[in-house]
Amino acid sequence: MKVDVFVIGAGVAGLTAAVKAAEKGLKVLAAEKGSGATIQSSGVIDVAGYFPPNHLLASASEGVRTIAEKVKNHPYSIIGGGKKAEPERRGQESERKVRRALEFFVEGMKSVGANFMGSLDENVLVTNFVGTFKPTCLCPFTMYNGDLRRLDGSSLVLVGVKGFPDYDPKFCAQSLWDILPRLGIKPKSVSHAYIDVPSLGGRGDILAIEIARKMDDPEVLENIGQSLQKVVGSAEHLAIPTCGVESPEENIKTLAEATGANVFEVASFPPSVPGYRLVKSLEKWAQKSGVSVRRGYKVLGANFDKNVKSLRVEIGRKIVEIEADVYILASGGFLGGGLKEEKDFIRESIFNLPVYSSDGVNLEEVYLEKLLSRKVFPKGGHQLFSCGILVDENLQPLSEKGEPVHSNLYAAGSILSGYNYMAEKSGMGVAIATGYLAGLKASS
Ligand SMILES: Cc1cc2nc3c(=O)[nH]c(=O)nc-3n(C[C@H](O)[C@H](O)[C@H](O)COP(=O)(O)OP(=O)(O)OC[C@H]3O[C@@H](n4cnc5c(N)ncnc54)[C@H](O)[C@@H]3O)c2cc1C
């Protein structure tokens, strides 16, 4: 089998790269062995939420520029021109590229019916399943009206569902009530309520995805609307834990109409319905753009000299060789499978590329435990979450000597070193920006 571009990985980085490469009419295959981090995410697009660590950023554009100016190994720096570029110029160039990549993503999502709202110039504050908050750049339509700044001077009811144990609205209400004043937000009240909807099933251990699927049924949605009417009182805002799989936006609008309140979805943790919806939308976008997306294709290794010639891929019980002109490595970090632990050391799993810490130390002989801080939440995050491979300004993986390893290999997403998505809140931003650029390079 032969294709023009082989993308290893079908997370947000791989599929953004694949769609960009397919724009030029190339035959693109995006193959994944299974799910990675993208499906586990809260489904919101973090670009830059904190920088330096713990400093809340009002705008992601400011964050991207500052990071690109100050942190030389960061992917935002690299796409801005890398070490050779002068810092201010690097910051501007990086911001321009991130902006373009996000526009491409937003348009793509819109084309498959998923509206992502927000702007690179103003972070949104969304709340989550533990009643804290996070700054994010873009979020699904279903969450956008839940920007916490809207709560100032008004009342919010956080709604739980009887029989759904994974969300505790009482705990979240208390937590939000404590946190909001620290953000300068003073709501009139934050309370909680439960709805009991027999048509959701009354087992006591119902999952978010089951509730979401049932909400796509107009009859069940009507029942939920009626239950919400009973708990809304005079509150202006209602927060619900999930809102559907196939028609989440329409469902939110229907519930807002039924209650007369601003209804929004809370950002959830794994297993995350918004993360699942994001992956489904990415797959639809890729397929619509002519990309072949294949699940259950595990890349075992590569045949190469100066160039990568082909990949050995396990498909069910067979092992086949697939050739391409260009390859994009978007295999993720530990969760995706791009990095693996071998006898306490860290390796890149397919090409055996050297792996580096965020400050550029080759991890060939650094024990994994050294990358974990003794503190549970260290300032700046654990080093382990910022290690990965090094690339040049063209996103080509580098050898120990600092030279591109293969002239037809590019990389994107969380396989890259130099950033800590947990501490910075930059996960999808880096993946989309580098995925876009890798797809562009691979197709030019
Ligand atoms: C719990 C959690 C919540 C998060 N929430 C958010 C959030 O709300 N917003 C945000 O911006 N970021 C969030 N992040 C970070 C974000 O999810 C990641 O940065 C982003 O999804 C990385 O995308 P990726 O495409 O690089 O990797 P992944 O999504 O991990 O994709 C890697 C892909 O490579 C494939 N693969 C790996 N090895 C092979 C192989 N040998 N053969 C074939 N395929 C292979 C995998 O199957 C997978 O398809 C979160 C992360 C976690 C863990």
Image (spheres, grey):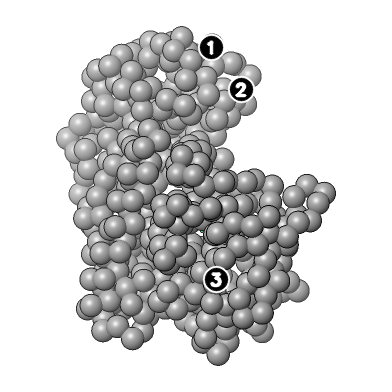
Q: Nearer the viewer, residue 438 or 164?
A: 438
Vertical relation: 360 (above or below) 221: below
The residue to which callout 1 is attached is 199
Q: Mark 3 and 2 residues: CB-CB less than 8 Å, in contact?
A: no
Q: Nearer the viewer, residue 442 or 150?
A: 442
| Observer able to see residue 157 | no
Q: Nearer the viewer, residue 288 or 212?
A: 288
Image-based side of 188 in relation to 211, left or right: left
The residue to which callout 2 is attached is 204
**Residue at the image point whose x is 35% and y is 23% from the top:** 250
Instruction: Report the Cα–Cα distance between label 3 and label 2.
Output: 50 Å
Kind of residue sitting beneath label 1: Ser
Image-based side of 2 in relation to 238, left or right: right
Q: Quadrant of residue 160?
A: top left
Neighbour class for label 1 at 10 Å: few (<14), some, many (≥20)?
some
Q: Mark 1 and 3 residues: CB-CB less than 8 Å, in contact?
A: no
**Residue at the image point whose x is 36% and y is 28% from the top:** 249
Q: Earlier in the sequence, mark 1 or mark 2?
A: 1
Instruction: Report the Cα–Cα distance between label 1 and label 3.
Output: 52 Å
Neighbour class for label 3 at 10 Å: few (<14), some, many (≥20)?
many
What element does badge 3 sit on?
strand
Q: Quadrant of the C terminus?
A: bottom left
What element does badge 2 sit on?
loop
Kind of residue sitting beneath label 3: Leu
Q: Position of residue 410 (x, y in %)?
A: 51, 69
Q: Quadrant of the N terminus?
A: bottom right
Q: Answer yes or no: disc 1 within 8 Å of ligand 1.
A: no
The image's mark for residue 409 is 3
**Residue at the image point whose x is 62% and y is 26% from the top:** 205
